[in-house]
Every structure is written in structure tokens, then in C-alpha cells.
Amino acid sequence: MTTRTTPPFRADHVGSLLRPAELLRARETLTGDALREAEDAAIRDVVRKQRDAGLRSATDGEFRRASWHMDFIYQLDGIGQAADEQITVRFHNQQGDIEFTPAALRVHDRIRLSEPIFADDFAFLRDTVGEGVVPKLTIPSPSMVHYRGGPASIDPGVYPDVEEFWRDLSAAYAEQVRRIGALGCTYLQFDDTSLAYLNDPSQRAELAERGDDAEHLHLRYIKQINAALAAKPAGMTITTHMCRGNFRSSWVASGGYDFVAEALFNELNVDGFFLEFDDERSGGFEPLRFVPPGKMVVLGLVTTKRGELESKDALKRRIDEAAKFVDLDQLCLSPQCGFSSTVEGNELTEEQQFAKLRLIVETAEEVWG
């Protein structure tokens, strides 16, 4: 097996990490510069812990965010919250269902990017990671702007032609990619639940009911992501992460990647795919047969939804199963999702979180060297 000197690495992770208790307290009591200083201290510590775990990439844990996606999306010009309207997202877990009711999204003006989003956050991470560790920035895919709100969220007075909406959205993302690259970002990840949700027939039925072409929406999303990446900076690795929902150890959708696989793996112009494969909800590895040479697949075999530590031997057996459909040299290992997609976090301890990351590093070393 070849040693990977560029991301994604043989042992990698998705992005978000559990917020430490002192940071949660700071978010409740501090504002402005005082809160920023508390976040800085927490990020320095969690970067050190990622390095100590043996990881070759590090994120800021998304410690400055309340949500993995909306903190970014609301900073795009022309997008805001609908103050008098909420949406309901039903999450599932082994004990039952829980509901997440965020404010609805509205596209009220032309979408633009005035300033690069998370620029200061990335610059701090870049200057913190130290030699030998690559700083990784995670942002939501452009698909999430549309999937979250749907056609009803787009003001027809602003965008009488929906093609103009798509052009502006991809152009804003392209500018974000360019400007974050100018700050030295060489590892950027587009987080995208939509392309995983679309594998679930019940999700496609909901989209059809609201007026979307649910059977072909993944093709539109692939097209718009590609437009956003068409002029990506030389030397920048871009991956996408696709899971089926992650909120307080619960999920939204089920089903394998079969529905989107052929178009996704062959047409989406990213360097690697972080895929969720932690349990039966995710289906089998058969869709990986569509992955072309040169593309990397990061197998999300370690769950972030429970604290119990996986068996190293079981992980190796599952890697062997995946290698029946895509070359072993194109595979890497990671958790199936972040540990804290929202500020609330999943139901495990920080100690369990880092035990899982160390397990990933050790397993990857034994499999790939």
C-alpha cells in the first residue's frame, strides 16, 4: 500500500468534536472577545488532542458553531431566517423519536459572498496545528441551501428563473473556495446530508410532495457542486461527507447509497468521499463498485452515536469486505459522522470520543502501514 502524504489520510475524521464543559459554560455566560478567547483556548487543546491521537489532519472541532451548516449558510448574502416560521425534522434513535425545530430558511435577495466565511476561524486553526498536521475546514455543501428550504424558500420576486438561483449559489461557493484557498487552506470538506437522504424512499416522497423532482435532484446537486469546484485552487484537496443525519445520537434517513451511487462516484468532482457505514441503516458496500480509479473512499465504520468501542478485528473484516468492490489502496478509515454536529453533541464522553479516534489510527496503521 502507498503511504498517503495528502488528504484524505488513512486515518481521518469528519470534523465536529464534543464541546468541553468549560466551553459550553462560556457560551452561556460570555460574549465578544471574552468568548473568542475561551474558544481559542478550547481549540488549542482539542488540536493538541487530535495530534496526540495520531491524526494527521485537525479541525477546530467546529467549536465556534452552534450548527454544522446553518452558521455558514446564514452568512451568505441574501439568505436569512424566516422569523415567524419553523421547520420540523424528525430524528430517530433506538429509544424513539426526537424533533429538531429550527427556524425556516428564506432566500430574500440575490445570493452573494461579500466576505469569506470562517476566514478568521480557519486562520487561527492554520496557525495552531503545528508542523506535520494539515488544518481541515468543513463547510456545508451548496446542496444544503436548497434541501433545507426547498422551492418555497426562494422568493420568486428575487429569482423568477430558478436557474439564476443555482448560478448565484454556485458562484458564491466558488468565491468561498477561492478565498479560503488564498488563506492557505489545502483540505476543504463539503458536508452534505442531502445526497445520503435521497437514498431513502421516504425522503424522496417528502421532496416530491413539496414540489421537487426527487428522482433527479441528486443530478442537480452534483452539477451545482461541480460548478462551485470548477476553479478550485491547485493543491487543494476537496472531499465530501455524506451521512443520514446526526443530532444527539439520532438520525433521519436510512438506506444504502445505491440510488445515487453511479452518478455520485463517477460525476462528482471531489477527491474523496467520507461515507457512513456504521450499521445496517447504511446498507452494504456494493455501491462502491462504481468508484473510479483515483478517487478515495473513507469508510465511516466507527460510530459516533454510541460510546462502546468497536473491535479492531471487526473493523479489519469490514475493510476487507469493502475491498471486494474498490481497491484497498483507495480506502481510508474514519468515524461515520462528527461527534457533535450541533452544540448539544452525541451521547458519549470525550474520553470515549478520543478512544475511538485512537482506534482508527491504530487500525489504519495495521491495515495500510
Image: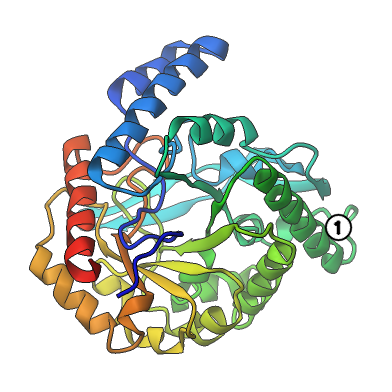
Q: Residue at x 78, y 44 (%)?
A: 113
Q: Residue at x 49, y 34 (%)?
A: 125
| Residue 269 position in % (x across, y down) | 61, 73
Mark 1 neighbour class, 10 Å CA radius: few under 14, some 14 to 19, many 20 or more: some
Position of 267 with respect to 4 (left or right) is right
Disc 1 target residue: 156
How many numbered dots are placed on residues in this image? 1
Quadrant position of residue 264: bottom right
| Residue 150 position in % (x across, y down) | 67, 61
Check the image and report above or below for 294 versus 163: below
Three-letter code for the amino acid on which mark 1 is drawn? Pro
Position of 176 with respect to 133 (left or right) is right
Q: Residue at x 22, y 57 (%)?
A: 360
Check the image and report above or below for 34 versus 175: above
Judge by depth and name the residue closer to the eye, 128 or 91: 128
| Residue 315 position in % (x across, y down) | 17, 68
Color scheme of the displayed model: rainbow
Judge by depth and name the residue closer to the eye, 97 or 229: 229
Considering the image in quadrants, where does the C terminus appear? bottom left
Quadrant position of residue 129: top left
| Residue 316 position in % (x across, y down) | 16, 72
Q: Residue at x 53, y 69 (%)?
A: 271
Check the image and report above or below for 183 versus 145: above
For the residue labelled by badge 1, is the local secondary structure a helix, a strand or a loop? loop
Considering the image in quadrants, where does the N terminus appear? bottom left
Check the image and report above or below for 339 versus 193: above
